[in-house]
Amino acid sequence: MAVREDVRGREALLARYAAERAKRLRADGNAQYVRLDAVLGAAERDPYTAPIARQPVRDHVAFAFIGAGFAGLVTGARLVEAGITDVRLIDKGGDVGGTWYWNRYPGAQCDTASMVYMPLLEETGHMPTEKYAHAPEILEQCRRIARQYGLYDKALFQTEVRGLAWDDAAKRWDITTDRGDRFTASFVGLGTGPLHVAKLPGIPGIADFKGRSFHTSRWDYDYTGGDAEGAAMDRLADKRVAIIGTGATAVQAVPHLARAAAKLHVVQRTPSSVDARNNAPLDPSWFASIATPGWQKRWLRNFTDNQAGGTAREDLVQDGWTDIARRIRAKLVGLPREQLTQAALLDALEASDFEKMDEIRARVDTLVEDEITAAKLKAWYRQLCKRPCFHDTYLQAFNLPSVELVDTDGKGVERITERGFVVGTREYEVDCIIFASGFEVGSGFVERAGFDVVGRDGMTLSQAWAEGMRSLHGTHVHGFPNLFFVQPAQGANLISNVPHNLTEAGETVAAIVRHALDRGAAEVEVTAEAEREWVELLLKAPPTLRGAPDCTPGYYNNEGGEATPAMRLAVGYPAGPSAYFTYLDAWRRSGMFAGLEMR
Ligand code: NDP
């Protein structure tokens, strides 16, 4: 059987893409997923830190930040630099780190170059050890920031906020938690991150399995052996393991499981596009030569300038993220000015994408020995339909005799039984099922956060955002004074380097709070008009190919369903991330903070 397919020409390729998409469309969309608690129980809450016993807190802080991941850490650091040291981080995890607290699965590492991904490298004096640092080093950077800026002092861990309400008479926020805390804060930041609620596929029988099962963000090293630092998972040597899901997490974990398990079934519904990673250690003498004052800002700027058709002449980072932008530029460079239209840009984008995806599919053939397996590992969609993946050993793992790709032809696992899982007519018996099934995305902010925010005059955030997010800069919401959202949407919306959005927002929040305190203002609030004008401006953004409606289903496009009003508003600055950061810098430096009222 000839399995090396030759899909040539735009129409044939689009037809193939459409057919693969059609296979995967499901009527239940986001409802196909369930939360961890529903299946695995509360025991899965925090496998990394023993329960923390403490008395409830009743006090007042200048600034409370919900979430101790990158958003809370960088905002906290900038506040401290601005002289606001009375900062409290609150997090459901047992330490700082957010995503990097929870995701300790084997092989976890950043997918964006450490030099731009890891926050506050220059401030902390840390040199990343690798081009793409592994998770323990990133978690340690989080701890380093917390230590350096004194953010541990007032932090509350293993604590979930249950209530956040504005007290208009006292001009402060009342905060309650699941630990019986009841305290107040003059200012509050929200940085709970988009991917903090783990989800499981709602496969029939999922609770019946009698072996061990866990989600990748709650890795059970007691069961597997080994540790997050990279020690081999020696307790899997006699185990049959299934990993369900082949997204960015599985791509990093599979090579490690493949080496450790007696038998590994990689259960695939949709293949990821897996480009080369080219990870390498960083050379200290090279680092010393470039790490001159202001280096990280220069690198951040350069990486962002290389995105979304930016205009940078050099490419410091040189990776898969900047590669596509280089290709687009190469296609546009020869065009006369009058032909540089939006349509021409979209054509260049599409042509670059086809070229890139052809290379990625060809790469599978060069690395995977079995032709049938190779064919099944090819991704038939545009690169930005799903999260692009990069790895140097994922595809090669399928050459090991102990590794079997169980491709479900877009349908997913049919059923889970006491002994294993069923795909097609076959039951696969396994000892352990690992769910690499991702995180809740389609739900609203309030649903994921687990609490509503009650602003001025009793208005809740879910009411204010009933038709989707409305803000100035993604940070300020009318009716919610002294509250700041630290997240990417409605700002730069730079997905290739999320921390860059957060460091810019954190710096801005600190500048605003400093200014308000210096002026003796008790309240900072965006005007309704500034918020409306900002949202109107954002809606002028040109269409992008990322998660377009014709994409294969996934969390980028509401599982292939209609874009909800909320999704239509999850956009960025029309002129792109670089222009946004330039704009924001000028807005901040002007000291006017146009659109905000301080009283
Ligand atoms: P994803 O949501 O990307 O992947 C979930 C996987 O589970 C998909 O392959 C999905 O298939 C599969 N799946 C869902 N339901 C079923 C089913 N019923 N049967 C079989 N398979 C099923 O989750 P990840 O944890 O991999 O990644 C989430 C995000 O986290 C990434 O997109 C990325 O943004 C981030 N991340 C970042 C990393 C980094 O920067 N280093 C590393 C890892 C993750 P299908 O595609 O068909 O839906």
Image (tube, grey):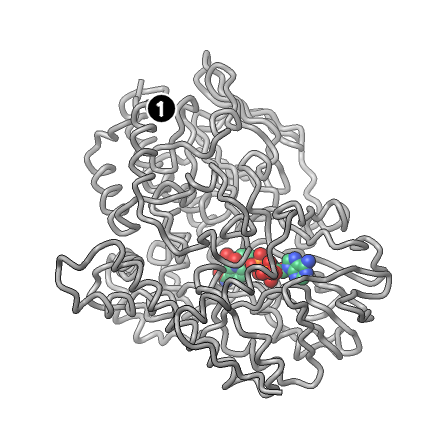
Q: In which image quadrant can residue 161 be found?
A: top right
Query: Which quadrant would the N terminus be assigned to in this image?
Result: bottom right
Residue 353 located left or right of residue 313: right
Badge 1 amino acid: Glu
Q: Residue at x 43, y 75 (%)?
A: 358
Residue 54 at what x, y percent from top left? 67, 36
Q: Is residue 104 visible?
A: no
Q: Which residue is mark 1?
A: 525
Q: Is residue 125 above or below residue 594?
A: below
Rendered-image quarter of ligand 1: bottom right
Q: Residue at x 39, y 24 (%)?
A: 478
Residue 103 at what x, y percent from top left? 59, 58
Q: Is residue 260 above or below residue 306?
A: below
In this view of the protein, which residue sits in the foreground, 108 or 294? 108
Residue 214 at what x, y percent from top left? 72, 58
Q: Give the tally of numbered discs.
A: 1
Q: Residue at x 36, y 21 (%)?
A: 523
Q: Is residue 316 above or below residue 49?
A: below
Q: Residue furthest left?
A: 337
Residue 141 at what x, y percent from top left? 46, 57
Q: Secondary structure at mark 1?
A: strand
In this view of the protein, which residue sits in the foreground, 70 or 326? 326
Mark 1 Cα-neighbour bin, 10 Å: few <14, some 14–19, many ≥20: some
Q: Residue at x 82, y 71 (%)?
A: 429
Q: Is residue 321 visible?
A: yes
Q: In which image quadrant can residue 328 be found?
A: bottom left
Residue 339 located left or right of residue 45: left
Residue 4 located left or right of residue 50: left
Query: Which quadrant would the C terminus be assigned to in this image?
Result: top left
